[in-house]
Image: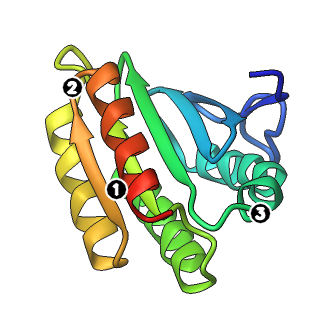
Amino acid sequence: MDQPSYNTRSLAQGKFRPHGYIEAIADGNLLRHQAWGPFNDELVVAYAALEERLLPQMLTFARWGDLVLFHDSAMAPRSTFDAFATHMLQRARLGQAAHVTALVMPPEVEGGEIMTGLFVNLYRDAGLLLQSFEDMAVAERWIRAELARGA
């Protein structure tokens, strides 16, 4: 992976700093995210800026995927989740969302079970394919197989 990585700290905007941290790197047709929570509303703004940097590259692929690994905490207030949901629904409407997403939520991540349920419902309602996993290796095998299946 010789691609540049981006993170929400370097793209923070506004009066208040984001709580939580997300970094992302493009690896071919796979966008790899690592996320450390808990998260706040300002993080969603920084995340949208991060995506703006990476989307042009990802949209060159007929199919691409998101592989998201959570660390520490996945918790966020309802307003933050709602802001993220609005962002994702807009991406889906514009045809700019990943074709498949693997969400990796190890059991030790605070709020993982709660937030996984919210993410699953959000992606289902947006018509997007998301599968949750506890193990990164299993998630990567699944997402690679899904991407190959649609090729």
Q: Quadrant of the N terminus?
A: top right
Q: Amino acid at mark 2?
A: Glu
**Amino acid at dot 1:** Arg
Please name the residue that numbered disc 2 is placed on. Answer: 134
Residue highlighted by disc 3: 60
Element at label 1: helix
| Quarter of the image where one finds residue 97 | bottom right
User: Mark 1 or 3, which is nearer the eye?
Assistant: 3
Cα gap from disc 2 to disc 1, whole angstroms:
24 Å
Q: Position of residue 57 (x, y in %)?
A: 80, 54
Display colour scheme: rainbow
Q: Position of residue 99 (x, y in %)?
A: 48, 64
Q: Mark 2 near mark 3, Cβ–Cβ under 8 Å?
A: no
Q: Does 32 appear above or below 14?
A: above
Local SS, label 3: loop
Q: Residue at point 76% right, 28% down?
A: 9
Between the C-alphas of marks 1 and 3, the distance is: 33 Å
Mark 2 vs mark 3: give the one in front: 3
Which amino acid is tagged 3? Answer: Thr
Distance from Cα at disc 2 to Cα at disc 3:
30 Å
Residue contact at pointers 1 and 3, CB within 8 angstroms: no
Spot occupied by residue 101 in the image (x, y as percentages of width and height)? 40, 51
Provide the residue designation for mark 1: 78
